[in-house]
Image (cartoon, coloured by chain):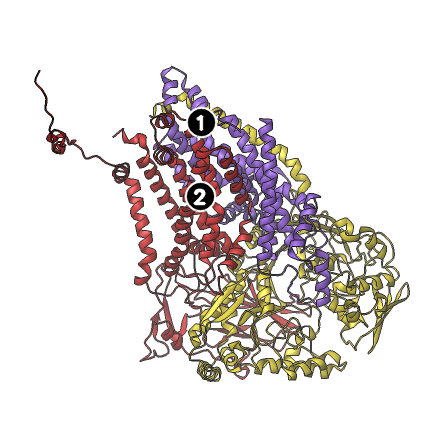
Chain colours: A yellow, B red, C purple
Amino acid sequence: MDTASGSSSVLRQLGLYALLTIVGIALLMWAMSWIASVTGSAERTQTAIDPETRSASFLLGDEPPQLDSSKATDALSGMVLGHVMEGLLAYNENNQLTAGVAERWDIRERGATFWLRRDAKWSNGEPITAHDFVYSWRLAVDPANSSQYAFLLYAVKNGEAITQGKMPLESLGVTAIDDYTLEVEFENSTAYFGKLVAFSTYYPINEKFHKSVKDRFGADADTLLYSGPYMIENWVHGASLKMVRNPHYWNPGRGGLDIIDFPYITSDPNARLNLFKDGKIAIAGLSAENLGEAIDRRWQMNAFAEGVVFYIEFNHRPGRVTGNRHLRRAMQLVNDPAELVYKVTKLPGYLPGKSLFPVWVQGVNGFFRQEYPAPEAPVNIEQARWHLEQAKQELGLDEIPPLILLTGDNPLSTLQSEYYQDRFKRTLGLDVRIDKQIFKQRLEKMTAGEFDMVMAGWGPDFDDPLTFGDLFASWNEQNRGKYASSELDAQVRIAQRSVDTQERMDAFGEIQRILFEDAVILPGYERGIVYVVDERLEGVVRRAVGPDPDYTFARIREGS
Amino acid sequence: MAETKLTPQDFAPLHSEREVQSLSRPSLSYWQDAWIRLKANRRALISLYIVIFLLAFTVVGPWFWTIDPSTIDPDQISQPPGANREVVVTAPYEPWSIDSIVVPASGMALVGEPTTQSIRMAWAPMPGAFGYRVYRNHFPVEPGKALGLPLVNILNPDETWFEDRLNLKAQDYYYAVVATDATGNRISDPVSVDVLPERVITAEEAIRRGIASAEEPPAIGTPLKMKLHPLGTDYLGRDMLSRLMHGARVSLFIGIFAPFAYVILGIAYGAIAGFLGGIIDQFMMRFADFVVALPFLLFMIVFKLAFSVGAGESGIFAMLIAMIVLLWPGTARLVRGQILQIREEGYVSAAKLMGANTNYLVLRHMIPNTMGVILVTLTFAVPSAIFTEAFLSFIGMGVAPPTPSWGSMCNEGIKTMLTTPHELLFPAALISITVLVFNLLGDGLRDALDARMRSRE
Amino acid sequence: MWRYAFKRLIQGIITVWFIATATFVAMQMAPGDPLSGEKALSEEIRANLEAKYGLDKHPVQQYFIYMGNLLKGDLGISYTQQNRQVNDIIAEHFPVSAILGVLAIVFAALGGILLGALTALFRNKAPDVIIMFLVILGISVPSFVVAAIAQLSLVNINDLLGFSLLPVAGWGTVQHMLIPALVLGLSTMAFLTRLMRSSMLEIINADYVRTARSKGLPESRIFSRHMLRNAILPVVTVLGPAIAGITTGGFVVELVFAIPGLGRYFVQAVQQLDYTVIMGTTVFYGAFLVLMVIIVDLLYGWVDPRVRLD
């Protein structure tokens, strides 16, 4: 049967086919390459930093889902918008609120006035006027536009009523006195309004342009009009995004980069690191797994606290065992955020969680957490067991039934839920079942209350403790565990209504105390980011609130 | 002519003459014959033993190696096999009280004994500082070189101390501190200190880990040995050997049951379609096309719901059903193609002429002749089923944690491929071995079942 | 032949309709709400969004509306990117997946056929053993591991050479395609090699091969005319579904190599329960797959004249 194998003529035949195959494939690839050149954009020669064209390349973790500033809700879209848009006020390189399109402003108890600079222009050269703000703010609360972030404009008079369709759009408390003066009326006094107008929902939108592109506003590079220091020159969905300087921006001296290029879009952490190693991108976030390599390669690393707090939220609905305060106290007393951060997540920049309010939140004169230290419950297993016994008695149970810990599908939250499962088993003998769900299914279960505990996190929308403080108000839709306490509600109302900073901060202090004493949540950690930066690049700004990272102040070092 | 008189005796059957007529060699059925040939194939036989061993590893293994695969050991995270296990008992951790801090007059100094529990340091205040940043490195500080891991940004010029507890190992560390300005820019040269911390464990932890007895708690300073993990530990300090054993349950279950079920379904479906031909074949094949095009992920979610996979249950059964229901058409198409081809062969026509019925034709001629292709499909279906499970874990839809599976272990291991390769290597090697033995076994079976080989021995 | 093709096309359309219906039903059954997000929605906004996407109507009504739009070729607007048409998403990202998939399948098919033939000819000799070992290695390592290792090796090679031999990730030129297509096609190539080897081995002993040889035909002619052509049949059979599998299964490769293909969109759509994108991509891929199967079947009749097409 092996008669054929010996024959060299057969092998020659096979060799010929192989040759034909290779030629065929080469031809095919050549043909494919021009098709691909239409669908992609990465050039082979592209490098992380190019001093000649003053360009720098970075990686986008995902495609920005929404560049219509009236609708954008996510951090990634916020980052991109922060580069190409500017609102009335903006954050500078020291993370201070400074003049943006408005050169002067006056925030009073019942309203505010903004005086716009005359040289602020759209990327098509037309001036940015007060009418553009009136138009965009109305758009944000327009029920027909159905923006998920309409609630940010509830601070403006009639904002909420308009969203509910009870009042006409024109009744929104914002008027353009003239082209360069914007007058705002508040619904209630809003001490932090200046911080609000720096947020993307408050960015201006040019009415004429918006109407000319209709539904496609923000879908592509040419269906946006830019007010910020950069503009999107080219956006290939899922592949790349390239920003160049906006020639009409009022402050042409800002930042040192002419081109901010995002030639890659992927969320794969290994790919990110490999691209950095290959000199294709100038910044790469690190995960705990590749810290060792980064140290050995002697990369310049930076860490910063990102501003997002993570915690376990209990289900307080009646009928759930987690509605029992003793049980929650027991779990609070064995919760060891230090172990979680130092042994499990293992990343510098992470801080063991102590409170719902992160460390960077501003208080009366300094940091809130320094003025109102978070109450602490050191690990005490003895006492925890006592609380557990109390809980069993109150609930009339011999054994606490298995608790369901709802968690997301990302690797980090899986890691933590596995840690918590072991932790509660080890210390209290509690059985915890991990219910790992993909995004929408998890939200569904959270909303329906099908959990005992859920791994939750909260990132700030604006730079005021209230962005965290009202989370557990009984009326807040975000309060998925349905915690209800009149004491806490009263404090939230004070924090919302008062204009006296001291009074407001005292209220937040009370909220922090109630959350602790009632063991409403188990703080986990405040997330940090460790990243490597190309040595030739400086001035990249990282911040907890506002566009992050911000490359608009970045420069290429001299001599590189 | 003599008259023949027939009696009933004449019609009685002859007594059996089996002994006289018996062959020198026992007649063997097709399957017996195949078994003999399989036994003669050494590679196939060894593979068979390995399959048995793997099953034993899964089923019996956990009785001998009783460590719980979900027990986390925060003191032994990502330990390779054969790592140093020596450890010294220490006092429980006490938060650092500010009063006890002695700030050195110049430079940076350690405070207290450096251990893997915590390393405390303090430094002399620096002029003009708005705050400080502390780094930790694996290399001594050199001018112009990176300082290593940034541990903390201190935003208070008077706070000149720091306690490091981040994932400390018993290895050399070089700490450095620099002064920073209001915007966090570095404004001074680094001041450094180096340290080799001692690996410690608290008595309480030691008892909980079972390396010291609760009756006589070990005194501080007692040397102990950490719990043995022959194949090392994973990223949460869980025992690799035990996880591999338990992971095999998921992976082998999915990897063996699902392919067998859907390949058999596919063979039956393809054989019927191919044999019957005509309009029924057309209809059946269009249905197969329809099933192939259904989105697996979406149906996976629906099956999970349909089988009411509760919270914390592994959902492995739903996964199995989803695979069987959705993955058979590939085999069906392949078998049908072969049957169509064989149907036209001479021996089939011959058998038909001799009056063979359908069952006989399909079971005796067609299926055995497609065996080669079927076995290839089957042997490939094993890894692809294992990886389907792994892929589902990759996108967060796999078995519920902490249930391990080889696929998800690979998935976790790939992240630390360079620093702790054992986390990837062991599960990947087991998958490879499984695939290899199924391939060799498949090869052996193919040869053994090949009717033509029969005549040649 | 043409009548057959036409008939198959009509059947194909019916199959696609079934696919669309089954997917629609499955989607309605899947738990979760496509409109929900990290931030809770107020009731008024939810109502508006439901009206925008027609979710306020009865599912049966939604089904007929969807089918009507489908006939018009309108796949609707994405839920996650609310200013993008599903038609645009497919038009932009399918070509990428298709290029990658076609290359991968070509690598896999040609490589598999050639290697399979080679191993069969050298059965149990060194080339066979070596290639079979590599094949088993190729199928026993998951694609995410292969992709990660391939990328890491590229980085190290570029580092060693001091210049960029091949890009590590991205999309746009031939250089970008080579490695991802190889990684994507690897397991299929291994599968086809095995399949080809197995079917070659059966043919080597076939009567017609013996007859051809006894007639005194040259070995090379027997090989290419009788053996190769017959052995290819099973390979052709699995090619159809394999093409679809590869073009849809590119998720991991697309993610690791930062390629803007449709695979990433589809997986994200399922996770986000983006109804219109799920429906659009499934229907589109269903149609694509059905078309591929028809082409393969036609090809089959051509490769093997014994199989009657009717």
x and y percentages locating residue C301 in the rendered image:
52, 27
Circle 2 — which element? helix
Circle 1 — which element? helix
Quarter of the image that includes the N terminus of chain B:
top left
Describe residue A144's horizontal placement relative to residue B456 as left or right: right
Distance from disc 2 to disc 1, alpha carbons, whole Å, reads 25 Å
Q: Residue at x 48, y 73 (%)?
A: B118
Does the rendering let one see residue B288? yes
Question: Marks 2 and 1: CB-CB under 8 Å?
Answer: no
Q: Nearer the viewer, residue B30 or B127?
A: B30
Does the rendering let one see residue C259? no
The residue beneath circle 1 is C230
Residue A252 to residue A373: above or below: above
x and y percentages locating residue A60 in the rendered image:
64, 54
x and y percentages locating residue B272 in the rendered image:
44, 38
Chain of the residue where label 2 is placed in the rendered structure: C
Q: Amino acid at mark 2?
A: Ile
